[in-house]
Structure formats: C-alpha cells, structure tokens
C-alpha cells in the first residue's frame, strides 16, 4: 500500500496558488458611472488641485482675523460658485459653504458666532488665522497619485476620480470564470419534484453570487453526469470559454469522481487535498492554458474553499494588488475540547459587545449544512492541534469581507 500523501497546509496552498496566478493584461475603458467593482489598470494622477481654491468650510463671514475686535461692514455676499472681490479693510463678506475665500480674508467665522444688524456684523469669541478655511490642494495636489493600479474601484473611489475631473476609467476587462457542476444526483431548482436520492444544485447559485460580487463574468457550463468521457468533454469545452474553470464535486476518491483524473489527462494537477476543514478535497491545476480549481461538492465546503483559496487567486488574476482579506480578533463564546488535524474554519455569529467582538459558534458545523454560512457572519480560524476555551481570543474573518 503506497504511503499517504500529507495534506498541504492552508497557508502553503494559498501561497502556491497565488504564485501561479497570472493576471490578465487586456484593458478596457469604462464610463466612470459604470466603473464600480472594476480593477484599475494604471495609476491615476491628478492634473488639478482639490479644492481648486481656498474656500469656506461653513456658512458665515469671511474676514481678517486681526479686524474682529471691531464691528465690520458687510461689503459683499459670496455664494458657492461665485468669486468675490478683494476684501477691503474693516469689512467682512457674507460667505457660504464651498465659496471661494476673497483676497484679503484669512478666516471664516460661523454664522452662529456672528450678529449682523443693518449691514454691520460683530463677532463673539476668539478668531484665529485659517479658521474654517479649506485651503487649495488640501485634499489633492496636482501631480499626486490619487489611486494606484490594482485597486478595486469602490463608490468613494469613483467620487475621488470625479473630483479630479475624470469621466472614464481604464481598467482590466472582467475575468471570465466557467462553472461546472458534477454529479448524477443534482437537479436544477424549478425542474420539478426531486426523485429519490436527488438534491437541488445549490452550488451553482452560490458561485454565481460570489462571482457577481467580484464583478467577474459567470460562464454557466451547467451540469455533467458522472461519466469519464462526458466529464473530459465538459472540461475541455469550459476551458475554451474562460480564463479559469471552477468545478464542484468529483475531486474526491470515489469511483464516480472523474474530475481529478480527467484534469490530469487534459492538463496537470498541482494541488490536491488540503489540511482544511471543511473542504479537504480541493484541486488546483490547469486544463491546457486555462487555470483550474476543483472545489468539493458539499455546499459549505464550496463556500469556504472558494472564499479562502479561489477568491484570492481569481482576484490576483484580475490584477488586484492586495487579494487577501483582513482578519480581526474576537473572544470565543464556545469551547473546542478536541484538537483537530486540519485548520478548521468554524461558522460563527460575531456580535459587538461592551467588551469587544464576541464569537458564538453556529450549532451545526456539518460541511453539508449551508445554513451554517447563511446564518453566520464570520469564520473563526482554529489552527491544527489547537483547543479553544471560552474566553480565548480567536482570529476571525468577516463573511462580508470575503463574500459580500
């Protein structure tokens, strides 16, 4: 009997797949209104200062700080979008938020601290130079790198680009990911009453949503029966349609698990079996020149392994500079008395408390129970060989950061 191949640790597997990821070089130009979720393909430099001129941070009066011991004549009114005339001595300008500061003024006093009577204004309280003024270039200076290549554009980034006058963004074209489900037991929702032994194909829909959140193109390759030749043909077809092929099921050791063998026949397999729970039977390699990821068949295993291994790999292929998600610390409201041999990702509900984040374990941790991820909001990381006592500090990964 051949010796058992040791399971690859999660960190080692992730480093391996990330090192193998070759990001696409094709770029497209998109209108800024449509740019959310795309990945910048070049640095963006500003050609202007933001704000473009010194302006008022609030409604009030623009004046010289040294003049405020006396009553000042209100010489002009400056709404946002207009430019006032230079401020004369012993005068103040009625000014509104965002309006340019007139030459000669060096402070703005909020209207609540001013009293205007018959065209004269008096000020209460001390006034210092620069008070309530947003100076030219305070946010962005001309020539600054505003956003760097490899950034996923968020709503606030779209606003940043708009603030420097960009109407379009140069980005990488979205990755095309082919998804293929395997298993004679699978049936599509809406296809009628399930026969005995059948289950609905939830993995297809989980992956469609996960890829949509990544703003990648979901290439639906449907389902393939448990047959070697049919599996080979389906894999070959999928590889011709996409940048990466993802399968669910068929990578374990059963007689009807054909995916692993057919990938080796059509290309190569670089990784099989991780020291991870849930999701040990995970495969990685290529079909011809197309990347391949074989996820397990159990629904929770699909979700967890996609988020932890496939997602960062796909993001790096997409050109994202930092494909891994941040991790937080939480206090365990549960215990794990028996150490495991694999790195376990427990589904937990994390709550904010006066003492910080508290992680409560979802009741059923079976890899076939999709409700464990649907009703949880984080994964708690339990390394191999570790036991957990209530009150211990754990590393957690918020699901919104990897699946939202």
Image (spheres, rainbow, N blue to C red):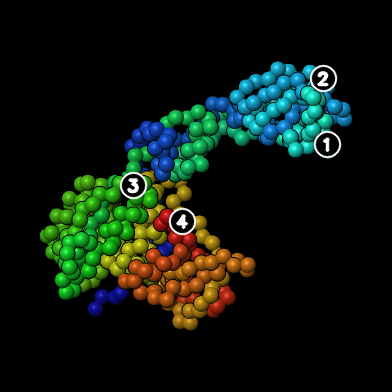
Q: What residue would you read off at disc 1?
A: 124
Q: Are marks 1 and 3 in contact (CB under 8 Å)?
A: no
Disc assigned to residue 194: none
Which secondary structure, mark 2?
Answer: loop
> Which of labels 3 and 2 is toward the front?
2
Q: Quadrant of residue 226?
A: bottom left
Q: Quadrant of residue 246?
A: bottom left
- Percent coordinates x, y for residue 329 in the rendering: 55, 65
Q: Mark 3: give few (<14), some (14-19) or many (20+) Cα within 10 Å.
A: many
Disc assigned to residue 401: 4
Question: Which of these two is toward me, 252 or 248?
Answer: 248
> Which of labels 2 and 1 is toward the front?
1
Q: Is residue 185 above or below residue 400?
A: below
Q: What residue would you read off at disc 2?
A: 89
Q: CA distance from mark 3 to mark 2?
A: 61 Å
Give the residue displayed 37% in from the left and 39% down from the top.
172
The answer to whether any part of residue 201 appears in the image is yes
Which of the two labelled residues, at mark 2 and mark 4, occupies the earlier sequence position?
2
Q: CA distance from mark 3 to mark 4?
A: 17 Å
Q: CA distance from mark 2 to mark 1?
A: 19 Å
Q: CA distance from mark 2 to mark 4?
A: 56 Å
> Which of labels 1 and 4 is toward the front?
1
Which of the two labelled residues, at mark 1 and mark 4, occupies the earlier sequence position?
1
Q: What residue would you read off at disc 3?
A: 216
Which of the two labelled residues, at mark 3 and mark 2, occupies the earlier sequence position?
2
Extreme-bottom residue of the structure: 337
Give the residue displayed 72% in from the left and 21% down from the top.
76
Which quadrant holds the C terminus? bottom left
Which of the two labelled residues, at mark 1 and mark 3, occupies the earlier sequence position?
1
């Amino acid at each position: 009997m051949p010796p058992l191949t040791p399971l690859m640790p999660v960190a080692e597997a992730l480093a391996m797949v990330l090192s193998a990821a070759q990001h696409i070089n094709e770029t497209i130009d998109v209108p800024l209104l449509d740019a959310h979720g795309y990945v910048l393909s070049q640095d963006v430099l500003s050609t202007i200062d933001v704000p473009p001129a010194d302006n008022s941070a609030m409604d009030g009066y623009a004046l010289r700080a040294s003049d405020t011991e006396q009553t000042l004549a209100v010489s002009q009114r400056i709404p946002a979008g207009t430019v006032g005339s230079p401020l004369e001595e012993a005068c103040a300008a009625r000014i509104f938020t965002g309006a340019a500061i007139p030459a000669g003024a060096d402070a703005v006093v909020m209207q609540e601290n001013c009293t205007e009577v018959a065209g004269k204004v008096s000020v209460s309280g001390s006034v210092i130079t620069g008070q309530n003024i947003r100076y030219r270039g305070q946010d962005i200076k001309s020539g600054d790198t505003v956003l760097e290549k490899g950034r996923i554009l968020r709503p606030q980034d779209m606003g940043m680009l708009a603030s420097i006058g960009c109407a379009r963004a140069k980005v990488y074209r979205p990755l095309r990911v082919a998804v293929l489900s395997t298993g004679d037991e699978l049936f599509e929702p809406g296809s009628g009453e399930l026969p005995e032994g059948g289950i609905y194909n939830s993995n297809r829909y989980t992956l469609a949503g996960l890829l949509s959140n990544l703003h990648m193109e979901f290439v639906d390759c449907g389902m393939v029966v448990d047959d070697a030749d049919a599996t080979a043909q389906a894999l070959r077809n999928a590889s011709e349609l996409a940048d990466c092929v993802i399968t669910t099921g068929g990578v374990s050791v059963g007689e009807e698990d054909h995916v692993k063998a057919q990938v080796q026949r059509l290309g190569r397999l670089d990784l099989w079996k991780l020291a991870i729970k849930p999701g040990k039977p995970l495969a990685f390699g290529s079909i011809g020149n197309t990347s391949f990821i074989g996820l397990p068949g159990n629904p929770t295993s699909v979700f967890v392994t996609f988020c932890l291994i496939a997602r960062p790999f796909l993001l790096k292929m997409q050109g994202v500079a930092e494909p891994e998600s941040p991790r937080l610390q939480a206090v365990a409201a549960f215990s794990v008395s028996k150490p495991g041999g694999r790195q376990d990702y427990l589904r937990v509900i994390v709550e904010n408390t006066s003492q910080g984040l508290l992680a409560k374990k979802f009741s059923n941790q079976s890899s076939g129970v999709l409700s464990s991820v649907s009703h949880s909001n984080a994964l708690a990381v339990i390394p191999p060989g570790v036991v957990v006592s209530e009150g211990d500090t754990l590393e957690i990964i918020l699901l919104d950061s990897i699946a939202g």
